[in-house]
């Protein structure tokens, strides 16, 4: 089975990234978690991205705040799908990171989830992998059914309470 690379620009992003780690582990997806800054160790970040396919990765997830160049830096050095998680910080509540992550030049796409949207980043990575992995596709369908059941249960409880 292939794996997902999760890269954060700083260890301070870990509380956000842990949501993605949890989801990927729940789905049985192999992961490798790294701290590689696009600014403080650009050579190592570039090397990781450039060798990611050979290393067995299918998708890369990059989490960074503020200038948030990590996802773009990784995407510039691989043809694998890269999903960016813009992380909030005390500056601009993550809007700066969102714009830095989503505004990529033509030819270097980065799929971007919402600010601190690690769970959706993990689910998107799983959806990408599920294109060629029927077992993952089935797990996704089961997860959606479970989410639907939870919403319908809450709906039934509220309807009973307020009708």
Image: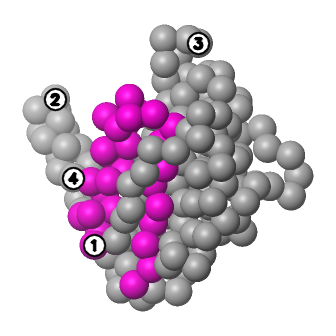
Residue sitting at x 51%, y 37%: 9
- Compare residues 143 and 41 and report the one nearer the observer: 41
Report how far apart the C-alphas of labels 3 and 1 lie in the structure.
35 Å
Circle number at residue 65 = none
Q: In this view of the protein, which residue sits in the foreground, 16 or 154?
A: 16
Which residue lies under the disc numbered 2?
162
Q: Quadrant of residue 147?
A: bottom left
Residue 18, can we see it?
A: yes
Asked where in the image residue 104 lies, by quadrant, the reply is: top right
Measured from the top left, where is residue 112 in percent x and y?
A: 62, 46
* Mark closer to the observer (4, 2): 4
The residue tagged with tag 4: helix, strand or loop? helix
Q: Nearer the viewer, mark 1 or mark 4?
A: 1
Secondary structure beneath label 3: helix
Q: Looking at the image, is mark 4 or mark 3 earlier in the sequence?
A: 3
N-term-proximal mark, 1 vs 4: 1
Q: Secondary structure at mark 1?
A: loop
According to the picture, the residue beneath numbered tag 1 turns out to be 28
Q: Residues within 10 Å of mark 4 (few under 14, many from 20)?
A: few
Residue indicated by mark 4: 150
**In this view, the mark in front (4 or 3):** 3
**The one of 40 and 95 positioned closer to us in this rendering:** 40
Rendering coords of residue 58 (x, y %) = 54, 73
Q: Marks 2 and 1: which is nearer the front?
A: 1
- The residue segment tinted magenta is 1-29
Q: What residue sits right under mark 3 in the picture?
A: 92
Position of residue 7 in the picture relative to residue 110 (left or right): left
- First reached walking from the N terminus: tag 3 or tag 1: 1
Q: Is residue 67 above or below residue 37?
A: above
> The N terminus appears in which quarter of the rendering?
bottom left
Query: Vertical placement of 121 versus 41: above or below?
Result: below
């Amino acid at each position: 089975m292939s794996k997902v690379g999760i890269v954060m620009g700083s260890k301070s992003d870990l509380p956000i990234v842990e949501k993605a780690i949890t989801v990927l582990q729940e789905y049985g997806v192999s992961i490798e978690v790294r701290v590689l800054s696009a600014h403080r160790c650009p050579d190592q970040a570039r090397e990781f991205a450039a060798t990611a396919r050979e290393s067995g990765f299918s998708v890369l997830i990059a989490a960074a705040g503020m200038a948030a160049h990590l996802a773009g830096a990784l995407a510039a050095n691989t043809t694998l799908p890269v999903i960016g998680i813009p992380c909030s910080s005390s500056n601009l509540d993550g809007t700066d990171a969102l714009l830095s992550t989503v505004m990529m030049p033509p030819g270097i796409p980065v799929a971007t989830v919402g600010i601190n949207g690690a769970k959706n980043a993990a689910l998107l990575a799983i959806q990408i992998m599920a294109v060629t992995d029927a077992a993952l596709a089935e797990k996704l369908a089961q997860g959606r059914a479970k989410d639907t059941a939870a919403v319908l249960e809450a709906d039934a409880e509220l309807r009973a309470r307020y009708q």
